[in-house]
Every structure is written in C-alpha cells, then in structure tokens.
Image (spheres, rainbow, N blue to C red):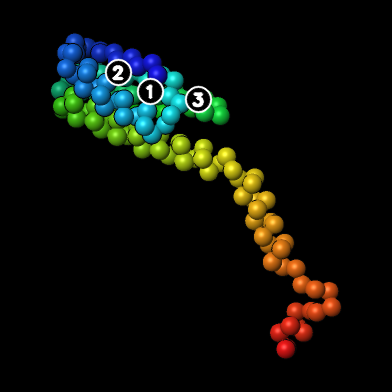
C-alpha cells in the first residue's frame, strides 16, 4: 500500500504526520486490496481540511474519496478516516454480495423445483380433500 501525505498552505509536523499514518493504517483492515492512499491536509482560513483518496483493486478498479472540514486538524483527520471506513465497508459488502449471485439463484431454483414436485397421479385437490 502506497501512502502519500501532502500539506497545502501550511507545514505539518512529524507528530501530525505520524498521527495521520496511524489512523490511515487502520483502513487496510476494512479492505484488503488497497493500492494507494493520497491524503491532502489543507488550511483554509480558520478551518482545516482533510481529503483522502483511496485507489483499490478487487475485481476491477474502485476509488473512494472523502473530505472533511474542522477547526482542529486531528479532528478533521479522524472524521475523514471514519468516512473512508464506512465507504470501504459498503464497497466490500457490495462486492461480496455480487460475487455469488449466480450460485444463489441456481440454488433457489433447485430448491423450488424439488419442493414443488407432485406425483402425476395425485392433483392438488386430491391431496387437500384427503
């Protein structure tokens, strides 16, 4: 996983950079095939802005982006990482549920077919009337 942290309009300290790295390393737990993460920390007036762009590959290419603004830079990082976590969980669930769709449909058809077999000599009315 390639991690890039960039600061605009301000310099970030090593402690803030390490804090962001620790928080972003958690994202690998939620989605296992992350190729790269690009983090942009920006100072706009009185607020701090955090942008996270994630490029992941699993059965195709997927991109996740989140942006937050807050007065505190660490709070902005936390909020942005939380948003990214939710998006990655949703993406992973979407991919998982899509993968076995054909097999689930086939299994459902087989169950229907086997449970609906009625012998030819008996009809539904004959079974109910007995």
User: Residue 30, how many percent across, how many down?
Assistant: 38, 34
Instruction: Count the numbered circles shown.
Output: 3
Residues tagged 2 and 1 counted as in contact (Cβ below 8 A): yes
How far is disc 3 from disc 2 in space, using C-alphas?
A: 21 Å
Instruction: Locate residue 90: give its quadrant.
Output: top left
Determine the secondary structure under disc 2.
strand
Residue 43 disc label: none
Q: Which SS class for mark 3?
A: strand
Quadrant in the picture for the N terminus: top left
Q: Quadrant of residue 125?
A: bottom right
Q: Characterize the local packing of mark 2: few (<14), some (14-19) or many (20 or more) Cα atoms within 10 angstroms.
A: some
In the image, is 54 to the left or to the right of 109?
left
Q: How much space separates mark 2 and mark 1, taking CA atoms?
A: 9 Å
Q: Which badge, 2 or 1, is on the more N-terminal residue?
A: 2
Work out which residue is located at the far right of the displayed protein and give it. 121
Determine if residue 69 is in view. Answer: no
- Residue in the image at 43% along x and 29% along y: 32
Residue, disc 3 = 57
Q: Which residue is mark 1?
A: 53
- Residue visible at 61% across and 50% down? 104
Q: Residue 47 appears at what percent x and percent y?
A: 18, 24
> What residue appears at the point 71 percent right and 63 percent down from the top-left corner?
114
Residue occupying the point 64% across, 46% down: 103
CA gap between label 1 and label 3 equals: 14 Å
Name the residue beneath numbered marker 2.
Answer: 40
Left or right of 49, for residue 56: right
Q: Is residue 25 above or below residue 122?
A: above
Q: Which one is in front in this view, the residue at disc 3 or the one at disc 2?
A: 3
Toward which corner of the image does residue 34 lie, by quadrant? top left
Instruction: Indicate the position of residue 62 as horizontal and vertical percent values.
Output: 48, 27
Tell me the crowding category of disc 3: few under 14, some 14 to 19, or many 20 or more residues within 10 angstroms, Cα based. some
């Amino acid at each position: 996983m390639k991690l890039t942290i960039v600061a605009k309009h301000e310099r970030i300290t090593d402690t803030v950079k390490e804090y962001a790295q620790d928080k972003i390393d958690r994202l690998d737990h939620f989605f296992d095939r992350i190729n790269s993460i690009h983090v942009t920390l920006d100072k706009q007036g009185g607020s701090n802005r955090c942008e996270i762009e994630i490029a992941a590959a699993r059965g195709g290419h997927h991109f996740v982006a989140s942006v937050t603004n807050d007065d505190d830079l660490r709070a902005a990082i936390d909020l942005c990482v939380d948003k990214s976590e939710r998006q990655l969980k949703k993406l992973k669930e979407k991919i998982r549920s899509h993968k076995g769709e054909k097999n689930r449909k086939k299994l459902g058809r087989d169950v229907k077919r086997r449970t609906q077999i009625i012998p030819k000599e008996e009809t539904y009315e004959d079974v109910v009337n007995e």
